[in-house]
């Protein structure tokens, strides 16, 4: 007797909801072109505002996940607007999108609670990456801007400020450095390659403005950076020669 095979069921993954966006730029042609490009890539809730006042009016009317804010306006200042916007909607993540961002602007933006910095000459895919990264609770900053910012902010006791720019992954790396783990141990525990682990470590050192792992741990402790507890099964006591 032939057996009837039950039909195979495939469950589709739920669609990923894109964050709602607000683009604030007095160059409306540029803002509307970017809004159209983002809409073509699946962003269905995109608002455009031509001034900080117009952006704040949108924020008062509805919650927004991510706001892309220009720096310079004829009748306002992007960083001042970012501060006010964050006071109105603390959950909104602000990304500065400007052709004029430099290390001084980034330093001021960090203090204002800005979550990222993008250049206007970046491609749409890079801007989307920045949006998705900050929406996930991380930060996005161009590497060249970051290096200049670290130098500037070190003169102003920047560790607490720069700690905001450590991602969850990098905080874990810092915790593993504090636990004495080597590059091999970090790679094994985090399920990444040794080169990726080495890159994570170097990024932590760069963001804290230090030159060694020990210095990173000491600076983090002095600044009161809270490190997560590592589960015992995730600790790896590797020999120091592996690092």
Image (tube, rainbow, N blue to C red):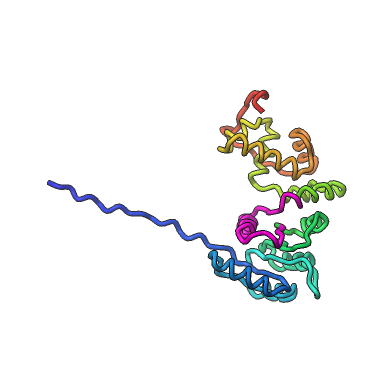
Place of residue 117 in the rendered image (x, y in percent of width and height, measured from the top left): 72, 58
Q: Position of residue 222 (x, y in %)?
A: 80, 40
* Residue 239 lies in the magenta-colored region: no
| Residue 23 image-quadrant placement | bottom right
**Residue found at x 80% / y 74%:** 74
Residue 58 place in picture, x, y as percent: 67, 74
Residue stretch rendered in magenta on the structure: 117-145
Q: Nearer the viewer, residue 194 or 166?
A: 194
Q: Is residue 124 magenta?
A: yes
In this rendering, is residue 164 above or below 222? below
Q: Residue furthest left?
A: 1
What residue is rendered at 63% in x and 64% in y?
65
From the viewer's perspective, is 120 left or right of 14?
A: right
Q: Quadrant of the C terminus?
A: top right
Judge left or right: residue 161 versus residue 93.
right
Residue 233 at x, y percent in the picture = 56, 32
Q: Going 58% across and 66% down the picture, which residue do you hit?
A: 38
């Amino acid at each position: 007797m032939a057996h009837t095979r039950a039909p195979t069921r495939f469950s589709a993954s739920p669609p990923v909801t894109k964050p709602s966006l607000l683009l604030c730029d007095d160059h409306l042609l540029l803002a509307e072109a970017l809004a159209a490009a983002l809409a073509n890539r699946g962003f269905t809730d995109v608002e455009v505002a031509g001034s900080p006042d117009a952006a704040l009016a949108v924020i008062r009317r509805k919650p927004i996940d991510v706001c892309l804010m220009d720096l310079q306006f004829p009748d306002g200042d992007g960083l001042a607007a970012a501060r006010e916007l964050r006071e109105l909607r603390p959950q909104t993540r602000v990304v500065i999108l400007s052709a004029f961002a430099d290390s001084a602007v980034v330093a001021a933006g960090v203090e204002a609670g800005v979550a990222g910095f993008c250049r206007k000459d970046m491609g749409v895919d890079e801007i989307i990456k920045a949006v998705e990264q900050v929406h996930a609770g991380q930060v996005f900053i161009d590497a060249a801007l970051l290096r200049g910012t670290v130098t500037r902010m070190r003169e102003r006791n920047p560790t607490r400020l720069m700690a905001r720019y450590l991602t969850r992954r990098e905080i874990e790396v810092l915790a593993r450095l504090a636990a004495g783990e080597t590059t091999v141990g970090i790679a094994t525990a985090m399920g990444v390659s040794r080169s990726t682990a080495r890159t994570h470590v170097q990024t932590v050192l760069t963001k804290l403005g230090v030159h060694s792992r020990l210095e990173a741990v000491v600076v983090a402790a002095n600044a009161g950076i809270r490190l997560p507890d590592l589960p015992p099964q995730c600790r790896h006591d590797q020999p120091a020669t592996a690092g």
